[in-house]
Amino acid sequence: MTIFQDQNYTQSVSATAEKYVFPASFAQQRLWFLDRLIGPSGLYNIAWAIRLDGVLDVPALQHSLDALVDRHEALRTGFIGQGSEAVQIISPSMPLACTLAELPDMETDRDGAARLILETAANQPFDLTKAPLIRTLLLKLSAQTHILLVTVHHSVFDGWSLAIFKHELAALYSAFSLGVAADLPDLPIQYADYAVWQREWLRGGVLTRQLDYWRGQLSGAATLVLPTDRPRPPQLSYRGTQAAIRLPAALSQDLKALAQQHNATLFMVLLAALQVLLHRYSGQDDIVVGTAIAGRTRQETEHLLGFFANTLALRADLSGNPSFCQLLGQVRKVCLEAYNHQELPFEKLVADMQLPRDRSRNPLFQVMLVLEPPSGEQGGAWAGLSVAPVAVAQDSAKFDLTLLWTEQPDGLSGVIEYSTDLFDAATVERMVGHLQTLLAGIVGQPDCTIGELPLLTAAERQQLLVGWNATQTDYPKDRCIHHLFETQAASTPQAIAVVFGREQLSYQVLNAKANQLAHYLISLHVAPEQAVGICLARSPAMIIAVLAILKAGACYVPLDPLYPKARLELMLTDAQVPVLITQGEYVADLADTQALIVDIAQLEALLSSFSTHNPAVLSQPEHSAYILYTSGSTGRPKGVAMPHRALVNLLNWQTDGLQQRPERRVLQFTSLNFDVSFQEIFSALSTGGGLVLITEAQRKDPRLLLAAIVSHKVTDLYLPFIALQQLAHTHASVLIDSHLAVIITAGEKLHATPAIKQFIKNLGGCRLVNQYGPTECHVVTAFDLPEDIRTWAEFPSIGRPIANTEIYLLDCNRQPVPVGVFGIIHIGGDCLAKGYYQQPELTAGKFIAHPFSNKPHARLYDTGDLARYLPDGNVEFLGRIDNQVKLRGYRIELGEIEAVLRRYPGIHEAVVLAREDQPGDKRLVAYLLHPQQGQPDISALALFVKAELPDYMLPSAFVVLAEWPLTPNGKLDRQALPAPDLLSLRLGHNYAPPSSATEEAMVVIWQEVLGISPIGVHDDFFELGGDSLFAMQLLVRIEEHFHNELPLSLLFDEPTISSFAKQLDVVLKQNNASKHTPIQALRRKSYQITEL
């Protein structure tokens, strides 16, 4: 036998004395473990098929297959478990039965029928305990046309093995059919010898050096989170399919030339390109991609069949927007170092890393890249036959995505294998197009930064930047807001404009009172665009004040009386308010302001002396209509100055097509500090409708609110999501006789809860419209939910941009993202605010130059909100970019946790925060809305969540609230959510002793396997330090004690003694204790073979 020596190896593979039982290799051990975990599956089947045209010598083919099985022990190998380990059981001889099949002559769709037969056979699971783990099927299409299908389990085979198999099968068939001897190389060892050698060699210093390298390389690697078409299921199903990809020969040659220029390989170029694509799709800089390596570093293994292939996790840092050439240099270095440390089995690395348990993902990476060499012929010539490959689709996917490239004479071709749980075919087809565009861009501009490399096709770019932003519509650009009201007042002077309880004001009276107050403000020398404060309770006086300030040419600054005094003072100072309109009960709290305080309740007599005619003030559309204050990240509120022109455009769009109907009534629900209040007021007063005011008590009580809606015959209702949910939950079971025609929700992400669906259904004929827009732009998009409530998404789209408004979804380099990929919402068009009042630096940072417009001084507003385009052009809103947190190295989308919590019975809403109540101790805290009597079972809820989410996404505490704390605008006040009592609400449990015989036995077994005592029945196996190795040991002990075979997945699904014992008791009742189970029979067989 050849002894191969170099600096990395001090031992050689040596032949092992003939035995029937051998240890499994580390790679085989993992596949055996996965087989126990996920159950029977064709996931690790390797299928190959060829079409044979000519006179087929079937006996020669059978002899050839038998000779291959006799030549390679791997094809006579099965597995059983001994303790927590797998061992190989090798039969001394074993003929391979070739299944024969024939298509009926009357079959019309012969291609379809053949494809179905082949795919069914290729995906049929193997029983790893029963050798051989190879099947062959010969399908006869006609007298001189056959298809041969060979299916082998990956535990005894790999890609290199397939090339050997093809070559040797062709050689053997030709030899048998011609009656000559086949010229095949001798095999100095068999795969089992390699498995023994691997376990002996990989220990001590060798193992330490390998582990040290990989720990340093992969420690803290981020989990890749790609945008998917559906939420990731809590457990991998491995369902998948494939999409084809092909590159032109010229592009393929250019990629090879680029690799040579940088002393790299084609694989390195393709890897760097894939990592750029994943970076651009996910927005993440830390990208890990897996790849397969042959693992045949020893000459003795060159001609062996077996599972030698190893997996390498290749990590790249794409931060700082490097050029592609710079990235390629980094990738080259990473690959070369990985090749020098390729001997560490991936299974050993995963075990050593002690990664958090996550059954929804693969360990370390979710995307795989493989480059196969040119396929050439199907292993060589078959005597008297012409041979052609036959594609066989396999309905599985091991990873989220696997990109498999093959070098062909006419260019690179390949397939993308993808998880159908996550991705639609159309999404992957777009991904293929983006990768092709990216690769073409790389060879054209290799020194271009990765953030600027082209990704979109020309057609996509045109659609995203132009087609879906074609919103240009005429509107009265020369008019101001109050002009619209004045025109309406002149048109319908006697119509009811404002209703407050029993008080009503006609348009004529409202206009007259507003004019008198406006003339009074002008007499106080209020200048154009000067800020005038309003601090009034809900009443007609508040509406009069708003109109008067606008008529005087000034802009109004709402000051909610419910705000803290300090915040009101800060807003007054920041806006430099010279005049403040308020009322008696608020005067004392505002006495410290430098503004002139006008008590509107004391002005009635004085105002009667002022003109009731419209003031002749030359207000300009570019002038500010209001300044609304929003929270600032520095703690200083930001004043958003909104011009008349933007608001006129909004009203023109909002009221387009509305007929002037005096019976139209709009409820004024929101605080004047919330921009939706503008919509409420002026969508009514610019169209002849009535504005219905309500008291603060009516706003806060859903029962009083609905009573007001019904009694005042309200037709149009604007509500934030939380307020809508409260209203719906209170009245979901009641048929409602109201005049409501439309409910518009905005300000928060809409969740179409069952209560809201039922509420809309009960209203009968009422539309629900979802609008989106930050204060800096007001309304930007709108989505009218379908009439058929059954078709509603749980989180409805925010729709498309409104008239004269543009929306762009951009990445961190401000490049447009593809359909389906999340980007930051940037807004352009006539909806933009002027900026932040008296904060030019902040304005310049958020209102940027428009990169896609030729108009002078065009701007975009960077919202900091995440969204993505759906294929139909509607926009799906995700949330604030800062709603994503990083905890213990993992990027976590809090909304994903919230969605799981909402599925628990009795939980109406959920909010998750990452709190750091103690420095350096950041924890996830779940807040649950549970208005019913009694508390939910936190222990049961914790177990429910643990079954759905990986460990690093589990909340550390749960806080149950009967109602949400709300801001004066009616939105959730996250700052007011209370800190949790971590001692009483943490996930852990106090010690609980066993309460049944099953639990008692389980406690003993757990304590012996884990070496921990005491263990309570509510303690979690994995939190106690259990891993896959311990899991197998534990399962074997439980099976031995209870004389029943159990699926390994049961321990992952039920990781506490209490929950596991309940399921075990069910199994024990169903099974006959005296019946020998398969695993017991296997152990008897193992004993007999060992004795032989």
Image (tube, helix red, strand yellow):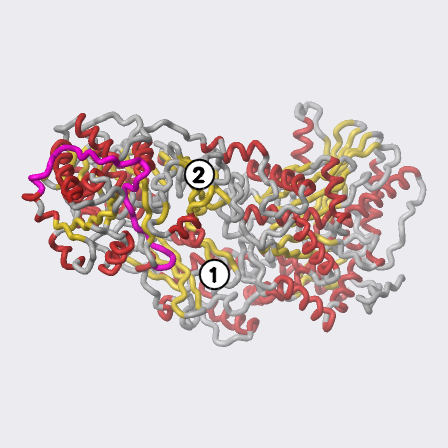
Q: Amino acid at mark 1?
A: Asp
> Quarter of the image holding residue 914?
bottom left
> Quarter of the image holding residue 103?
top right
**Mostly what secondary structure, the magenta segment?**
loop
User: Hey, which residue is sitting farthest right in the picture?
Assistant: 180
Give the vertical position of 404 relative to 481 (above or below). Answer: below
Residue bearing the label numbered 1: 1065
At 83% across and 39% down in the image, what residue appears? 61
User: Hey, which residue is sitting farthest bottom in the picture?
Assistant: 1013
Give the vertical position of 471 relative to 636 (above or below). Answer: above
> Quarter of the image holding residue 436?
top right
Mark 2 falls on what kind of element?
A: loop
Residue bearing the label numbered 2: 858
- Visible in this render: residue 761? no
Who is closer to the viewer here, 963 or 1077?
A: 963
Q: CA distance from mark 1 to mark 2?
A: 70 Å
Report the side of 191 relative to 549 (left or right): right
Mark 1 falls on what kind of element?
A: helix
Where residue 253 appears, x then y in whole percent?
A: 76, 40
User: Hey, which residue is sitting farthest left in the picture?
Assistant: 605
At 86% across and 65% down in the image, what residue appears? 5
Where residue 211 appears, x then y in whole percent?
A: 67, 67
The residues colored magenta run 607-635
Who is closer to the viewer here, 288 or 475?
A: 475
Q: Was residue 241 drawn as part of the magenta stretch in this picture? A: no
At 54% across and 50% down in the image, what residue appears? 283
Give the vertical position of 62 relative to 1039 (above or below). Answer: above
Q: Amino acid at mark 2?
A: Ala
Who is closer to the viewer here, 959 or 130?
A: 959
Report the disc number at residue 174: none
